[in-house]
Amino acid sequence: MSSRTVIRGGLVITASDEIHADVLIEDGRIAALAASGTPAAEAWNAERTIDATGKYVIPGGVDAHTHMELPFGGTFASDTFETGTRAAAWGGTTTIVDFAVQSVGHSLREGLDAWHAKAEGNCAIDYAFHMIVSDVNQETLKEMDLLVEEGVTSFKQFMAYPGVFYSDDGQILRAMQRSAENGGLIMMHAENGIAIDVLVEQALARGETDPRYHGEVRKALLEAEATHRAIKLAQVAGAPLYVVHVSAMEAVAELARARDEGLNVFGETCPQYLFLSTDNLAEPDFEGSKYVCSTPLRPKEHQAKLWQGLRTNDLQVVSTDHCPFCFVGQKELGRGDFSKIPNGLPGVENRMDLLHQAVVDGHISRRRWIEIACATPARMFGMYPKKGTIAPGADADVVIYDPHAEQIISAETHHMNVDYSAYEGKRLTGRVETVLSRGELVITEREYTGHAGHGTYTPRSTCQYLT
């Protein structure tokens, strides 16, 4: 049985165009677009009509950096694939790319299978996986080839967290050389973890235990140094590089320099670095622990350089690095020792709205909003034009967005499984009204109408963003 939906009267916004058009959806895909009011559009018949008059019709968001159920620091991220993908849908995101984890001494396959088991049958929206590579050896390198063939085409390495996820320069180089051959993309957490651990030890010895010292020991220069080193290793290997959660202006400068040299080097930032700062880390009564993440929040002057990087395309993607830990019982593990605070913030529900606020505030254009939140992440990670745009043949992942509605972000009203909001009390203009995932209504006029198990696993091709 064929099913058809027509979305009428909205302003369709993609990374390249803004047009007043009706959208025809058939069997879960975009079938056609036609200018509103024209005979072609008027001739469409459908079982369901959605009135988008006065609203934006945008592609569902692609959040290319989430951590559902991630084990970290003796606990687990508080969102499951069920709660996290439901919250993502509420925020207008219709695809996540989560991180499967290889544990040291285990194979990539074991880690990937474990994450498939967590996600399968539980997701409200579509999902894919990156692979965290924690143990580079000859078997791991062979497995990378196999994973690329089956649609896991990106591999994350860490210059941070010695003893947990850390890879040394030799391991990083070997993985980069392999990705240069198999078409994979290395994603890098670029912080000098060895040096940071020295500074952590020294700070604690001085009695500096509060959350704000998390930001002081993870210095911007150590993010910049690691970013520079990752770029040079990628250059030696002849491999592309994607640097995750860029927070420091000095790191942006390293990326810009590499891109000016014509290298396939890319950068991602996150809403927390665009809207929050070390002022939050310094909040009294251990409230600052709510804002402990790595890379850390920076002083406010870094924000302007991040926005500039997004405008000049030295930063290409805004993801969330969604990794929530409750304040009570989880963040509190670090009372008296900031190094024991689980690293991560909730944000998968807030990204599209915060970036729309950036449009309202004049930081970026409407099309750039869609580019950094939908189209480029889909292209970067091999899902375009199936995901990230509204065009014939694309999956019908569509958001009806009310650009005039006003909201106040609060833990009392959000849908993430965490007991606080990093943006508590922030006033925003713009709000998701209706969300379709592959043509199925997941959010219907601010009511959840989706279900666990609708979301399907999405194998990916290799990076479509290389120069």
Image: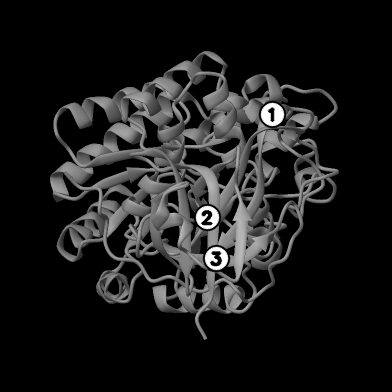
Taking 22 as reference, is 371 above or below it? above
How far apart marks 3 and 2 lie (CA) works out to 11 Å
Query: Tag count in the figure?
Result: 3
> Residue at the location (45% across, 46% down)?
21
Q: Which residue is mark 1?
A: 428
Counting from the top left corner in percent of width and height, residue 351 is at 58, 41
Circle 1 SS class? strand
Q: Is residue 238 left or right of residue 426?
A: left
Q: For this rendering, which residue is in front, 12 or 455?
A: 12
> Residue at the location (36% across, 50% down)?
187
Counting from the top left corner in percent of width and height, residue 12 is at 46, 44
Residue 422 in sight? yes
Name the kind of residue labelled 3 in the image: Thr
Q: Earlier in the sequence, mark 3 or mark 2?
A: 3
> Residue at the location (83% across, 51% down)?
329
What is the number of the mark on residue 398? 2
